[in-house]
Image (cartoon, rainbow, N blue to C red):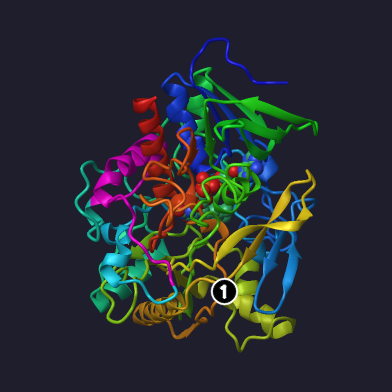
Amino acid sequence: MAFRCADDCLRCDFIGAGAGGGTAAGVLAEAGKRVLLLERGQSLSFEEVGRDHLRNQRLSQYGNNVGPDGEGNARLYQDFVGQYLVPPHDGRYQNNAATVGGGTRVFGAQAWRFMPQDFRMASEYGTPEGSSLADWPITYDDLAPYYERAEWEIGVCGHADAMQHLPAYARPYPMPPLPVNLQGRTLRQGAAALGWATNPVPLLINSMDYNNRPACIYCQHCVGFACPVDAKNGTQNTMITRALRTGNCTLVTGAMVERILVSDGGRVTGIAYHDPAGERMEVSADIVIVSAGAVESARLLLNSASRHEPNGLGNGGDQVGRHLQGHYYPGAIGLFPENVQDNVGPGVTTATCQFNHGNDGIVGGGMLADEFILLPIVLWKRKLPPDVPRWGAANKAFMRENYLRVADVTGPVHEIPSPDARVSVSTQMRDQYGIPIPHLSGTTHPETVRTAAFMHQRARQWLTASGAIKVWGNTPALYLSGGQHQAGTCRMGDDPQTSAVDRWGRVHGHDNLFVMDGSVHVTNGGFNPVLTIMALAFRAAEHIVQTW
Ligand SMILES: Cc1cc2nc3c(=O)[nH]c(=O)nc-3n(C[C@H](O)[C@H](O)[C@H](O)COP(=O)(O)OP(=O)(O)OC[C@H]3O[C@@H](n4cnc5c(N)ncnc54)[C@H](O)[C@@H]3O)c2cc1C
C-alpha cells in the first residue's frame, strides 16, 4: 500500500515525531506541503504516561513510561571490558523517548539558547588532540531569529534581560518566569555572596494561559512525567497539533521505519516501514526528513546503504554515527540546617551561566542550576551522602529527617567530542522487525572529564556559600555519553569529508534527504539542547519552504 497525494503537492516523509521532526512537520504542513509523520511510539495520554516512580524516563529502574518497549528493541553497548546487549531501561542504552512528542512529552522543559562561543569552539579553544572539536558552519546570529520563533510559537517563560551571558534579545520571552521557590531563594543568596550572576531558568512551560492552555500548577512530578494540566509545551501539543489541524499532515503511530529507499540512480525516493499491524510498507516521497534522534537517525542512514553508497547514505566521509555526545552532568548535593524544599514545582528556578566560558585552562564549561523536585526514591537511589547506610533504621531516619533539607545543584557540561564515540550497526543482531540494531562504542574525549571536575567544584562552592553544612557528590569518570541529550552523529558542515549534512541539514550528496534533530549539532553547548534542536528545525524547514 502507498501513501499518495490527491494532488501534485510536495510530499515530505518524516521519520520521528519528536522535538526536531514535530517542529519541522508543523512548518511544512502550514506551508501547504503534504506531510506523512511516522512515529514508532504511541500518542500517550496523561494517564497512560502515569506516575510510576520506578518506571519513568527519569528513573527507569524497571522500565520506561514513554518507550521504547522493553522487548525486541535492544542495543549493543561496548566498553573497555566487553560488549553487552542492553534493554531500553538500562542507562548504557542511551535512551531518550519513543512517543509522539519524543523527549518533549516528558522533558524538564529547560529552554536554553546556546551562547555565541558554543558555535565556534575550535576557534575559541583549539582542537584538543584526539578530539573532533570543530566550529559550526553557522553562527549564533544565524540561529537567533529561530530561537525567538521557538520561544514564541512553542512557548517559553523566562526573563530575557537577565540572560546577561547572551547578546541582547530582539524580543523578550512571551511569558514571565515561574515563581522562585525556597531552594531557588536560598541559592540566589549564596550566588550573591560569591558575586556570581544568576538568572531564572527559561522553561517551555506556561507561566500564564498561553496558546489556549492553562498555566503551571507547580506540581512535583514535572521532569520524567506528563503535565496534568497540559501546561508543559512539547511538540505534541504545539507544532504537531498545528500540523494536524491543517489537514495536510497524516500521523501514523506504531510505525517503525526500516530504511530510506533509493532509486537505481541513487536518488532518495521514499521509505520502508513496519506498520502497527506488522506489515511492511513502502511509501514514496519528494523529500525525506530524518528526525529519529541522534542514535536512531545515524542507524537509519547506515542501514540504508545502497549500491551507490555501500557505507550508508551521506557517509562518504565516514562521519555518520561518529562524534556521539550528550552531556556530562556533574553537580553536588548539600544538606542545610533548615528546610530548603517547599515542594513548589517544577523545582528548577535559578541558574548561573558564569562558568560556561572563560575558565582558565579549561575547555568550555557549563551551566549550573538548582534541580527539579527530587522524588524520594531518586534521593535514596542516587543522592545519599556516602556515609549514610543504604537500608535499615539509620537510612530511614536520614530520609525522614533530611528529605526537605537537601538541595541539589547540577548542570550540563560542554562535551569535547571524540570521533571514536560512535553509533554503528550490528552485523549480527537484529531487532523485532529484523532491522540491524545500533552498536554503541567509544567514550567522549578526556578533556570533558576535566571540565566536569571543574564544574563539580563550582557546584560545591555554590552550596557551601548558600549555607550547606555538609556537601557531597562525585566527579564523573570517562564514559560514553548520549542519553537524553544525545547529539552529534550527523554533524553539519560545509565539507562532506568532515560532516554528514550541510548547514541546512541536507545530507551531503542528496538534494532531497534531510536530518532535523539533535544529530546535526557539531558540539552540544553547555546547556540543555532542546531549544537549539527546535530552532534548527524551524530554520531548515523554512529553507525547504522557500527553496522548493
Ligand atoms: C526525562 C527527560 C527530560 C529532559 N529534559 C530536558 C530539558 O529540560 N531541556 C532540554 O533541552 N532537553 C531535555 N530533554 C532532552 C530532549 O527531550 C531531547 O534533547 C529532544 O527531545 C531530542 O530531540 P530529537 O528531535 O533529536 O529527538 P526525539 O525528541 O527523541 O525524537 C525522535 C523520535 O523519533 C522516533 N523514532 C526513532 N526511530 C524511529 C524509526 N525508525 N521510525 C519511526 N520513528 C522513530 C522516536 O520514537 C522519537 O519519538 C529531556 C529528555 C527527557 C526524556
Can residue 467 be seen in the rendering of this structure? no
Left or right, residue 40 beside residue 365: right
As drawn, 268 above or below 111:
above
Which amino acid does the dot numbered 1 rest on? Tyr
As drawn, 264 above or below 424:
above
Give residue 212's position: percent from left, percent from top: 44, 29
Left or right, residue 411 beside residue 92: left
Give residue 429's position: percent from left, percent from top: 78, 56
Give residue 286's position: percent from left, percent from top: 52, 25
Which residues are the magenta region?
A: 131-160
Q: Residue extending furthest bottom?
A: 387
- Does 329 lie within the magenta span? no
Give residue 254's position: percent from left, percent from top: 71, 36
The quarter holding residue 375 reads: bottom right
The quarter holding residue 4 reads: top right
- Quarter holding the N terminus? top right
- Does 144 lie within the magenta span? yes
Residue at 54 percent across and 68 percent down: it is 420
Can residue 276 be seen in the rendering of this structure? yes
As drawn, 503 above or below 348:
above
- Residue identified by numbered label 1: 479
Q: Residues within 10 Å of mark 1 (few under 14, many from 20)?
A: some
- Quarter holding the C terminus? top left
Check disc 1 and report its element: helix, strand or loop.
loop
Please name whichever residue, 509 or 265, is drawn nearer the observer in this view of the structure.
265
Please name whichever residue, 304 or 335, is drawn nearer the observer in this view of the structure.
304
